[in-house]
Image (cartoon, helix red, strand yellow):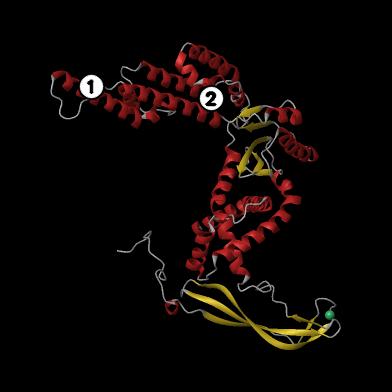
């Protein structure tokens, strides 16, 4: 029985004959005038003849039929300039376009706002609006929109972005082939503040110039920077000190934890391999002697153990364990003190980042952890990340309660970029990247308006 939420195909799906497609509803419109002022000299010019063009418009979702506009328009002749011109119809469609402005707007929104790749956007337009636009045409529109956005962005975007500047920023770089995108995002309001596209891997000089540009923008508005979060890259500390001076610099805790987690999982894998190697080699066939049967049992036991360690490997690095997970962990690490130590170390690492303690306490804990680690020969090598000098910098946020502990704010934008990068580029040029980023910035800027409208709609429905 059909009910809400059922997934049903579009009625036109599977059509193979052109004649079976829904027939467009043809609407006549007119831009026919006796005289019009010449766009060049303003001379009131007589109609010379009539012409017509067909425009594809958004269709009717109720009847499921496309809608074509047949537009009759007058062509005029200016006797002063001796030129012909058409009656103005740019409110409806751009010159030379086969589609109305409404269609172009809808298509560009599907790609920019909803993040649809071009081909799915082409289908969505047909499905929801019964207008077919080849995906390459949508691509042309979006790329043209990118150029317009780049021009629109620069002068006024910083004013908007810095209007409620929190003082805390996250900075990151993103690589795309030979290009690199540097961006700064407000770590509390999550607004992208500025970005720059480089055609080479960034050097400290590039970062310094980029930060310098941002610093100048802050100064011009009388704002100050209170804290900055970056990943563990060595590109940042020097330029930060040069440009911003003494400002709290936090390394993203996600990045640190990711490294430690990777190291712990690596160590578990190594121990697993070592364990698997201790399993006895068996002769082919059914074990005959008593010793062979014993060896077969032992091999099975070890394989079971290795399998368990693999299946439950995430328990070694998970932050919070439930009682039953803890029990599983104890079971699979029986007779393997190394593994239990590993889990203990991981817990201590998590405790370092506990928001309830101060930086000083965490630093003492870190020193204790390192001292403990020094006593374990092999583990020390695998967990050498814990000795890296950057780790102290990841604990700064404990004292600066407003400082973002992660650079997730900037990573979010980068993830969105990566997603669209997978589907959209015909040519990856610096200009194309800049255009896409400009569009993304506009999308972000309009997000508040979209949320407000959704809210209002909610209220209207409840009223
Ligand atoms: Zn004229």
Q: Quadrant of residue 391?
A: top right
Q: Is residue 221 left or right of residue 375?
A: right
Residue 343 percent location from the top left of the image: 41, 21
Q: Eyeballing the image, is 455 above or below 353?
A: below
Coordinates of residue 359 in the picture (x, y in percent): 60, 20
Q: Residue 282 occupies which quadrant of the picture? A: top left
Identify the residue at image location x=68%, y=28%. Answer: 237
Above or below — where is 349 with respect to 367? Answer: below
- Residue at 66% x, 57% y is 146
Say which label, 1 or 2, has the lower sequence index: 1
Q: Quadrant of the N terminus?
A: bottom left
Task: Quickly name the residue at label 1.
Answer: 298
In the drawing, does residue 224 fall left or right of residue 441? right
Above/below status of 76 relative to 184:
below
Assess disc 1: are there few (<14), some (14-19) or many (≥20) residues with their C-alpha within 10 Å of its C-alpha: some
| Marks 1/2: CA–CA distance | 42 Å
Above or below: residue 154 compared with residue 239: below
Q: Position of residue 337 (x, y in %)?
A: 36, 16
User: How many neighbours does mark 2 have within 10 angstroms: few (below 14), some (14-19), or many (20 or more)?
Assistant: many
Disc 2 target residue:
353
């Amino acid at each position: 029985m059909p009910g809400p939420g059922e997934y049903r195909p579009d009625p036109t799906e599977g059509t193979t004959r052109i004649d079976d497609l829904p027939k467009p509803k043809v609407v006549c419109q007119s831009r026919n005038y006796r005289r019009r002022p010449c766009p060049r000299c303003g001379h009131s010019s007589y109609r010379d003849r009539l012409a017509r063009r067909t425009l594809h418009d958004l269709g009717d979702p109720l009847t499921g039929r496309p809608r074509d506009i047949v537009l009759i328009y007058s062509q005029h002749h200016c006797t002063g300039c001796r030129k012909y011109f058409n009656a103005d119809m740019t409110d409806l469609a751009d010159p030379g376009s086969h589609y109305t402005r409404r269609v172009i707007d809808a298509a560009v929104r599907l790609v920019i706002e909803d993040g649809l790749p071009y081909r799915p956007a082409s289908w969505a337009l047909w499905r929801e609006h019964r207008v077919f636009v080849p995906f390459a045409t949508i691509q042309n529109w979006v790329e043209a929109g990118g150029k317009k956005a780049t021009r629109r962005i620069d002068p006024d975007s910083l004013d908007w972005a810095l209007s409620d500047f929190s003082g805390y920023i996250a900075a990151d770089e993103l690589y795309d082939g030979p290009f690199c995108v540097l961006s700064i995002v407000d770590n509390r309001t999550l607004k992208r503040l500025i970005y720059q596209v480089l055609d080479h891997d960034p050097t400290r000089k590039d970062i310094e110039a980029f930060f310098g540009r941002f610093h100048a923008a802050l100064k011009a508005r009388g704002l100050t920077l209170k804290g900055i979060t970056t990943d563990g890259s060595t590109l940042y500390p020097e330029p930060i000190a040069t440009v911003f001076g003494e400002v709290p610099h936090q390394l993203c805790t996600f990045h640190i934890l990711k490294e430690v987690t990777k190291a712990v999982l690596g160590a578990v894998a190594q121990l697993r391999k070592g364990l698997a190697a201790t399993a006895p080699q068996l002769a082919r066939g059914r074990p005959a002697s008593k010793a062979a049967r014993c060896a077969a049992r032992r091999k099975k036991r070890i394989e079971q153990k290795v399998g368990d360690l693999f299946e439950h490997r995430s328990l070694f690095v998970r932050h919070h364990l439930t009682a039953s997970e803890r029990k599983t962990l104890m079971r699979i690490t029986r007779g393997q003190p190394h593994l239990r130590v590993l889990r203990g170390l991981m817990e201590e690492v998590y405790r370092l980042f506990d928001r309830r303690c101060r930086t000083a306490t965490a630093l003492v804990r870190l020193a204790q952890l390192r001292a403990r680690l020094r006593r374990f020969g092999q583990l020390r090598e695998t967990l050498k990340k814990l000795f890296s000098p950057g780790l102290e910098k990841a604990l700064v946020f404990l004292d600066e309660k407003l400082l973002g502990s992660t650079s997730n704010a900037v990573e979010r934008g980068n993830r969105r970029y990566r997603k669209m990068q997978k589907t959209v580029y015909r040519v990856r040029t610096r200009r194309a990247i800049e255009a896409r980023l400009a569009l993304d910035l506009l999308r972000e800027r309009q997000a508040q308006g979209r949320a407000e409208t959704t809210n209002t709609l909610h209220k209207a429905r409840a009223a």
